[in-house]
Image: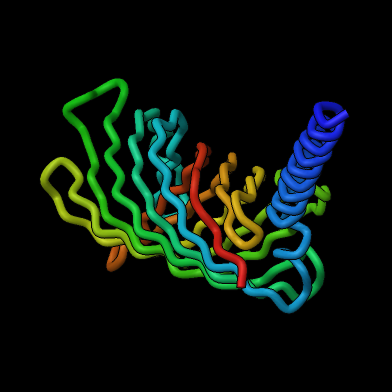
Amino acid sequence: MKKRTAMFVLLMVAGGLLFAQSAKAAKTEKAKSGGNAIKSGNVMIGGKFESILEFGDTRQYQGGTELTNVSANTFRFMIAGEAGYFVFDGLEFGLHLAFQYLDQTNIENPSTYARSFTVFPGVQTGYFFETGGIFVPYGKATATYLYTNTNGSGTVTEYSGVQLRPEAGVNLFVKDNISLEAGLYLSYTYRVVLGSSPESSSSTLGGGINVGVNFFL
């Protein structure tokens, strides 16, 4: 009898511990859900970086006339910071600031290169899709002004312009207010050479990937 009682108590204790552990796991899973983080009135602060090899065409113009359509291999490293305020559940508006190092080499003539540093101040907006779980997809659009200082095959040139980029990806919530982010983007960049006469400009289409971390307050 004593053995049966001891076994019953042991099973009850084990079952209680198992239930408590399951409840704790469920609570933790719920806490990690992105649902509460993207509610109206919350603030998002994040940072990300990009390092990608791009293949694309750069179209160059002078006085409104297209001069060349240059194919180039591009290596780019960018770090960016963003801050946004959720005006509605899932929908945020905010600011964007990025710094970029870029190295381009002409495919047809490798001795022709351009190395540049660019700053991108601008605005961004994003929509985060509530899923009830730890994976939260998002879509984002960013518009920035840009200033570039370029060393092109030994000649220093300054540019100003704009960049537009749509982006889509997913956030993985590792805590209720912290997420890891990964996304794909496309970009259109238009630049004008400062002080050029007639006006010399270029436009570039690109794309790539980025990863980062976000904090929700």
Task: Establish if 71 lies above or below 78.
Answer: above
Q: How is the image coloured?
A: rainbow
Q: Nearer the viewer, residue 103 or 61?
A: 103
Q: Nearer the viewer, residue 154 or 21?
A: 21
Q: Provide residue 111's location: percent of width, then percent of height.
A: 16, 28
Residue visible at 34% across and 44% down in the picture: 77
Looking at the image, residue 152 sits to the left or right of residue 104; the answer is left
> Who is closer to the viewer here, 60 or 131?
131
Q: In the picture provided, is 126 more to the left or to the right than 123? A: right
Residue situated furthest top in the rendering: 108
At a point 67% along the width and 71% down the height, the residue shown is 93
Q: Quadrant of residue 156?
A: bottom left
Left or right: 64 with respect to 85? left
Q: Is residue 197 visible?
A: no
Residue lying furthest bottom in this view?
41
Q: Position of residue 126 (x, y in %)?
A: 69, 60
Image quarter where the C terminus lies is: bottom right
Give the number of marks: 0
Rendered residue at 76%/47% (across/down): 20
Residue 171 in the image, given as x and y percentages of width and height: 64, 48
Up the image or down, 77 lies above or below 121; here it is above
Q: Is residue 159 visible?
A: yes
Residue furthest front as drawn:
1
Front residue of 172/200: it is 172
Coordinates of residue 181 in the picture (x, y in percent): 57, 47
Tell me the residue at 33%/35% (across/down).
75
* Left/right of residue 55 with respect to residue 119 in the rendered view: right
| Quadrant for the N terminus in the image | top right
